[in-house]
Image: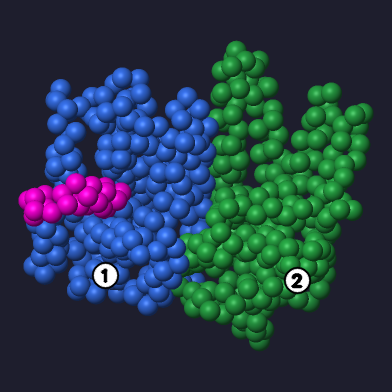
Chain colours: A green, B blue
Amino acid sequence: MTLTLALVQILNGLQFGLILFLIAAGLTLVFGVMDFINLAHGVQYMVGAYLLAAFTAMTGSFVAGLALALPSALLFGLLLEVLIFRHLYDRSHLDQVLATFGVIIFLNQAVKFIWGAAPLSVPIPDALSGAVEIADGMLYPVWRLVIIAVGLAVGLALYLVVNKTKLGMLVRAGASNAAMVSALGVNIRLLFTIVFGVGAMLAGFAGAMVAPLLSVEPGMGDNVLILAFVVIVIGGIGSIRGAFIAALLIGLVDTLGRFFAPTLLRVLLDPAAASQTGRAIAPMLIYILMAAVLFFRPSGLFPVKS
Amino acid sequence: MNKLVDLEAPASPTLAAPVRSGRVLLLPLIVFALLAAVPIATLWGPQGYVLSLITRIMILALAAMSLDLLIGYGAMISFGHAAYVGLGAYSVAILSSHGINDGFVQLGTALVVCFVFALVTGAISLRTKGVYFIMITLAFGQMLYFLGTSLAAYGGDDGLTLASRSILFGSKFLKSDVALYYVTFGILLSAYLLLRAVVASRFGRVLRGIRENPVRMEAIGFAPYRYQLTTYVIAGLIAGVSGCLLANQTEFVSPAFATWQRSGDLIFVIVLGGLGSLHGAIIGAAVFSLLADILSHYTEHWALIFGPILILVVLFARGGIGGLLGSKP
């Protein structure tokens, strides 16, 4: 019984980690290539979820909604890049943090203005709304398995693009020394626009995939953004491989921590105190993990820049 | 590569002591004189509302001023500064919920807690540089926020209402809004003078030297880490004091005091008022709060205007309002 429960928690952690990876992938590349710190990346996730909710309601089909939401999220990301972010690349990190913070304030309010403050819900597509039996009498929702499969597929695709194609080679070169790549005649601005657009779309895609599981509401991207930052800092800024490993690590530690911390503490404390303390400690675990990683490796697990 | 070139560069003019000309002194003098006169001026108006608004502005200014020491003078961009406001506020509220209402015990506790938290997290954070520093301070702030939300005994997510304001010298005089106003004013003024003295001292000059070029400072025999950590702790302590005041002003605390959005607001405030001037924090806090207050009278969607203002300030108004008023950051 405990073993199957643990299996469910591991799957949940894996699913959460892969969603984090979809968000963190774009963030880490944008960070790595342009040294641009984009707090507004979290709202891309929110915008993705809202676009999906709107288009699904409009067309009556999740697949059609997703097909419309993805290019819209891409266009929206590029629009922000052209309007605002482009003017911030040469600025200090402080300016970048502040201006993109302004974008968050604006967009969180804008979705409230357009869709209202009440959370929206999106139905899971009919064909995938069931559950499968993963162990004796233990059902697991198909949609979460779909997210795991899709997340792994995107991770693999990104790995192939970044490591096996010319575009990927330029991205990697840009992450380790952007000035040198530019000096060799590569249009680094264009390269960055591509990276930025793809990153924005992936974050929007993550939002769209979890929309049926969570409520779609203003500010939903804010906490996810912080987690994505934790992921890329642990993984090493600019490293896709680092982001993938760190995302899974964070997803598993967070999910399993919440599940096991109260149980484990029961060995030391009485049950009531254990569940109290456990619930207090569990959400702090990933930040403690991050502090520990940075203490020993100040540039993350897989540093890109020397 | 840049570092080598920098070694040849002439000393930056910003290294000079900040308080030289009378003009720079005039602005803070006017600001504090105005603040001191507010309770008298409002005798003929909606006193309660104005006093509570300006008390909140001064509390915000106090927290922002301590962050200005970190960012403006130390170039340490902390994105978790609201955590200390939260620590200060919760020190008051938790002690109060156990019947300990003495203001000095509460303040002492807040200072000890902030000192320990700043020392430990600062020691770890300062091992990192640049973006990593921003991120790790952000993470420590979020860590405290989540701790606050999980304190079920103290209201968890919903926060905690104070039974009474702090008791000072055995008297409940803080119950009066005017008394709280002047206590806040006194603390803000003391903090300003203290920080002025800090940045004008040898310590302050070393700090600004580290901001301009840590490598060069190290080469001439200073250990940047120790200076930065001391600064980090001082800033944390002052923000903790502002948290104590905030708990008294609102008579309520909640984990929302410590979210990263509040840390962002603090940065907004000092950039708005002008980085590295200390009194800019007061001007920034006033403009920030009044703007939010006025806009929210017109529309519930005031953030739609607030966000773009922030972006425009960053893109076009370097030096903030203090810069426009002629004080050199």
A94 with respect to B168 (left or right): right
Q: Position of residue B228 (x, y in %)?
A: 36, 49
- Magenta segment includes B69: no
Q: Of the residues shown, which amino acid type is indicated by label 1? A: Ile
Q: Residue at x 69, y 65 (%)?
A: A54
- Residue A32 visible, this angle: no
| Same-subunit check for callouts 1 and 2 | no
Q: Is residue B270 above or below residue A289?
A: below
- Marked residue chain, label 2: A
A32 with respect to B8 (left or right): right
- Report the predominant secondary structure element of the magenta stretch: helix
Residue to which mark 1 is pinned: B321
Q: Quadrant of residue B115?
A: top left
Q: Quadrant of the C terminus of chain A?
A: bottom right
Start and end of the magenta stretch? B36-63
Q: Is residue B95 above or below residue A190?
A: above
Q: Residue at x 24, y 51 (%)?
A: B53
Q: Tell which of B227 and B171 is nearer to you.
A: B171
Q: Residue at x 70, y 44 (%)?
A: A251
Q: Position of residue A111 (x, y in %)?
A: 56, 63
Residue to which mark 2 is pinned: A68
